[in-house]
Amino acid sequence: MGSMGNYYNAFDISPVPVPGPDAVAPEPFRGIYGMPSFVTIPTGDLAASVDFWTQGLDFFELFSAPGQLVHLRRWAFQDVLLVPSESAQDQAPAMSVSFACVLTQIDALADACRAHGAGAVSDPRDTAWGTRDVEVITPENVRVVFTAAKPFDPASPAAKNLEAMGITAPDAGGEKNGSHAS
Protein backbone atom coordinates (compact mmCIF):
# COMPACT_ATOMS: atom_id res chain seq x y z
CA MET A 1 0.00 0.00 0.00
CA GLY A 2 1.37 3.42 -0.97
CA SER A 3 1.85 6.23 1.48
CA MET A 4 0.03 9.53 1.31
CA GLY A 5 2.31 11.06 3.95
CA ASN A 6 3.96 13.67 1.71
CA TYR A 7 1.05 15.75 0.52
CA TYR A 8 -0.24 19.23 1.17
CA ASN A 9 -3.19 21.44 0.36
CA ALA A 10 -2.86 22.66 -3.24
CA PHE A 11 -6.33 24.03 -3.90
CA ASP A 12 -4.73 27.27 -5.11
CA ILE A 13 -3.67 25.64 -8.42
CA SER A 14 -7.05 24.03 -9.10
CA PRO A 15 -10.22 25.57 -10.51
CA VAL A 16 -12.22 23.22 -8.26
CA PRO A 17 -13.60 25.17 -5.27
CA VAL A 18 -13.14 23.93 -1.72
CA PRO A 19 -16.11 21.63 -0.97
CA GLY A 20 -18.91 23.16 1.03
CA PRO A 21 -22.61 23.88 0.95
CA ASP A 22 -21.94 27.31 -0.56
CA ALA A 23 -19.30 26.19 -3.08
CA VAL A 24 -19.75 28.04 -6.36
CA ALA A 25 -18.62 26.65 -9.71
CA PRO A 26 -16.01 28.75 -11.47
CA GLU A 27 -16.99 30.63 -14.59
CA PRO A 28 -16.34 28.88 -17.91
CA PHE A 29 -12.64 29.36 -18.70
CA ARG A 30 -11.98 30.87 -22.12
CA GLY A 31 -8.22 31.33 -21.81
CA ILE A 32 -5.73 29.55 -24.06
CA TYR A 33 -3.12 27.37 -22.36
CA GLY A 34 -1.00 24.29 -22.97
CA MET A 35 -3.47 21.54 -22.09
CA PRO A 36 -1.96 19.21 -19.45
CA SER A 37 -4.65 16.64 -20.23
CA PHE A 38 -7.60 16.31 -22.59
CA VAL A 39 -9.96 13.72 -24.04
CA THR A 40 -10.39 13.11 -27.77
CA ILE A 41 -13.77 11.62 -28.69
CA PRO A 42 -14.55 10.26 -32.15
CA THR A 43 -18.11 10.86 -33.34
CA GLY A 44 -20.15 9.90 -36.37
CA ASP A 45 -22.24 13.09 -36.07
CA LEU A 46 -20.17 16.09 -35.03
CA ALA A 47 -23.11 18.52 -34.87
CA ALA A 48 -25.23 16.17 -32.73
CA SER A 49 -22.30 15.55 -30.39
CA VAL A 50 -21.63 19.27 -29.97
CA ASP A 51 -25.33 19.76 -29.19
CA PHE A 52 -25.33 17.03 -26.52
CA TRP A 53 -22.09 18.14 -24.87
CA THR A 54 -23.10 21.80 -24.80
CA GLN A 55 -26.81 21.43 -23.94
CA GLY A 56 -26.62 18.32 -21.74
CA LEU A 57 -23.15 18.39 -20.19
CA ASP A 58 -22.66 22.16 -19.81
CA PHE A 59 -19.57 22.49 -22.02
CA PHE A 60 -19.08 25.39 -24.42
CA GLU A 61 -17.44 25.52 -27.83
CA LEU A 62 -14.02 27.12 -27.42
CA PHE A 63 -13.21 26.88 -31.15
CA SER A 64 -13.63 24.62 -34.15
CA ALA A 65 -11.99 23.68 -37.42
CA PRO A 66 -15.11 22.98 -39.51
CA GLY A 67 -15.51 19.31 -40.30
CA GLN A 68 -12.25 18.40 -38.51
CA LEU A 69 -12.42 19.24 -34.82
CA VAL A 70 -14.49 20.96 -32.14
CA HIS A 71 -12.73 21.97 -28.92
CA LEU A 72 -15.11 22.00 -25.95
CA ARG A 73 -14.45 23.17 -22.40
CA ARG A 74 -16.19 23.72 -19.05
CA TRP A 75 -13.72 24.86 -16.40
CA ALA A 76 -9.96 25.31 -16.81
CA PHE A 77 -8.34 21.93 -17.57
CA GLN A 78 -11.66 20.30 -18.57
CA ASP A 79 -11.04 20.01 -22.30
CA VAL A 80 -12.73 17.69 -24.81
CA LEU A 81 -11.87 17.41 -28.50
CA LEU A 82 -14.65 16.04 -30.71
CA VAL A 83 -13.38 14.64 -34.01
CA PRO A 84 -15.32 13.13 -36.90
CA SER A 85 -15.05 9.38 -37.37
CA GLU A 86 -16.51 6.78 -39.70
CA SER A 87 -16.69 4.19 -36.92
CA ALA A 88 -18.18 4.52 -33.46
CA GLN A 89 -17.97 2.40 -30.33
CA ASP A 90 -20.77 -0.16 -30.11
CA GLN A 91 -20.93 0.09 -26.34
CA ALA A 92 -19.50 2.17 -23.53
CA PRO A 93 -16.14 0.91 -22.25
CA ALA A 94 -15.51 0.12 -18.60
CA MET A 95 -13.10 3.06 -18.52
CA SER A 96 -14.56 6.47 -17.78
CA VAL A 97 -13.53 10.11 -17.90
CA SER A 98 -14.44 12.22 -14.88
CA PHE A 99 -15.05 15.94 -14.58
CA ALA A 100 -15.27 17.84 -11.31
CA CYS A 101 -18.33 19.90 -10.53
CA VAL A 102 -19.96 21.28 -7.39
CA LEU A 103 -22.79 19.58 -5.51
CA THR A 104 -25.42 22.01 -6.76
CA GLN A 105 -24.61 20.99 -10.36
CA ILE A 106 -25.11 17.21 -10.03
CA ASP A 107 -28.91 17.14 -10.26
CA ALA A 108 -28.98 19.93 -12.87
CA LEU A 109 -26.54 18.03 -15.12
CA ALA A 110 -28.55 14.82 -14.79
CA ASP A 111 -31.79 16.71 -15.55
CA ALA A 112 -30.28 18.48 -18.58
CA CYS A 113 -29.02 15.20 -20.03
CA ARG A 114 -32.39 13.53 -19.50
CA ALA A 115 -34.19 16.52 -21.05
CA HIS A 116 -31.89 16.37 -24.08
CA GLY A 117 -33.03 12.81 -24.71
CA ALA A 118 -29.75 11.42 -26.05
CA GLY A 119 -27.48 9.20 -24.00
CA ALA A 120 -28.25 7.52 -20.68
CA VAL A 121 -28.03 9.00 -17.18
CA SER A 122 -27.68 7.26 -13.82
CA ASP A 123 -29.22 8.47 -10.60
CA PRO A 124 -26.73 10.42 -8.49
CA ARG A 125 -24.90 8.24 -5.97
CA ASP A 126 -22.74 8.91 -2.94
CA THR A 127 -19.31 7.28 -2.80
CA ALA A 128 -17.33 5.88 0.12
CA TRP A 129 -14.67 8.59 -0.43
CA GLY A 130 -17.00 11.55 0.03
CA THR A 131 -18.26 12.52 -3.41
CA ARG A 132 -21.61 12.51 -5.15
CA ASP A 133 -21.37 11.24 -8.72
CA VAL A 134 -23.62 10.97 -11.73
CA GLU A 135 -22.68 8.83 -14.72
CA VAL A 136 -23.66 9.68 -18.28
CA ILE A 137 -23.24 7.46 -21.32
CA THR A 138 -22.99 9.92 -24.20
CA PRO A 139 -24.36 9.31 -27.71
CA GLU A 140 -20.74 8.45 -28.70
CA ASN A 141 -20.79 5.71 -26.01
CA VAL A 142 -18.34 7.53 -23.75
CA ARG A 143 -18.73 6.92 -20.02
CA VAL A 144 -18.58 10.38 -18.40
CA VAL A 145 -18.73 10.81 -14.63
CA PHE A 146 -19.43 14.17 -13.04
CA THR A 147 -18.10 14.12 -9.49
CA ALA A 148 -18.65 16.65 -6.71
CA ALA A 149 -16.84 16.59 -3.38
CA LYS A 150 -19.12 16.70 -0.38
CA PRO A 151 -18.16 18.89 2.59
CA PHE A 152 -15.56 17.13 4.72
CA ASP A 153 -16.80 15.90 8.10
CA PRO A 154 -13.94 14.39 10.12
CA ALA A 155 -16.43 12.19 12.02
CA SER A 156 -18.08 10.78 8.88
CA PRO A 157 -17.73 7.23 7.57
CA ALA A 158 -16.10 8.70 4.43
CA ALA A 159 -13.41 10.38 6.58
CA LYS A 160 -12.80 7.09 8.40
CA ASN A 161 -12.52 5.25 5.05
CA LEU A 162 -9.99 7.83 3.81
CA GLU A 163 -8.00 7.64 7.04
CA ALA A 164 -7.89 3.83 6.76
CA MET A 165 -6.24 4.36 3.33
CA GLY A 166 -3.68 6.71 4.87
CA ILE A 167 -5.34 9.95 3.78
CA THR A 168 -5.92 12.42 6.60
CA ALA A 169 -7.28 15.93 6.46
CA PRO A 170 -4.82 18.82 6.44
CA ASP A 171 -4.77 20.83 9.64
CA ALA A 172 -6.58 24.17 9.85
CA GLY A 173 -3.57 25.92 8.28
CA GLY A 174 -3.79 23.74 5.19
CA GLU A 175 -0.60 21.81 5.94
CA LYS A 176 0.00 18.20 6.88
CA ASN A 177 3.30 16.63 7.93
CA GLY A 178 5.22 19.89 8.18
CA SER A 179 6.12 22.50 5.59
CA HIS A 180 6.50 21.82 1.89
CA ALA A 181 8.38 23.41 -0.96
CA SER A 182 6.36 25.73 -3.11
Image: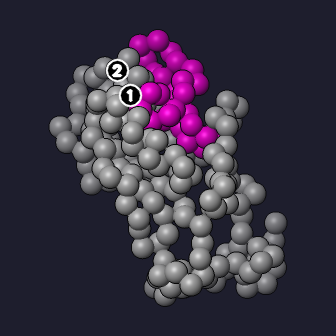
Count numbered badges in the picture.
2
Res. 34 visible in picture:
no
For the point 32% across and 52% down, the residue is 123
Instruction: Please name the residue that numbered disc 2 is placed on.
Output: 48
- Height in image: 143 above or below 153? above
What x and y, as percent, mark residue 161?
47, 82
Instruction: Please name the residue that numbered disc 1 is placed on.
Output: 52
Q: Gap between marks 1 and 2, in whole Å?
A: 6 Å
Residue sitting nearer the eye, 48 or 118: 118
Determine if the magenta segment contains residue 64.
yes
Residue 85: quadrant of the picture: top left
State the extent of the magenta-drawn residues as a range. 54-80
Q: Viewed as shown, does residue 45 lie left or right of 182?
A: left
Q: Viewed as shown, does residue 177 lie left or right of 124?
A: right
Cβ atoms under marks 1 and 2 closer than 8 Å: yes
Check disc 1 and report its element: helix, strand or loop.
helix
Determine if the magenta segment contains residue 19.
no
Residue 154: quadrant of the picture: bottom right
Q: Which amino acid type corresponds to the residue marked 1 in the rendered image? A: Phe
- Name of the residue lying farthest toward the bottom: 164
Q: Quadrant of the C terminus?
A: bottom right
Q: How is the image coloured?
A: one colour
What x and y, as percent, mark residue 17?
67, 54
Check disc 2 and report its element: helix, strand or loop.
helix
What x and y, as percent, mark residue 138?
32, 37
Q: Residues within 10 Å of mark 2 (few under 14, many from 20)?
A: some
For the point 47% across and 12% down, the residue is 66
For the point 31% across and 44% down, the residue is 121
Q: Viewed as shown, does residue 48 lie left or right of 8?
A: left
Res. 53 visible in picture:
yes
Q: Which amino acid type corresponds to the residue marked 2 in the rendered image? A: Ala
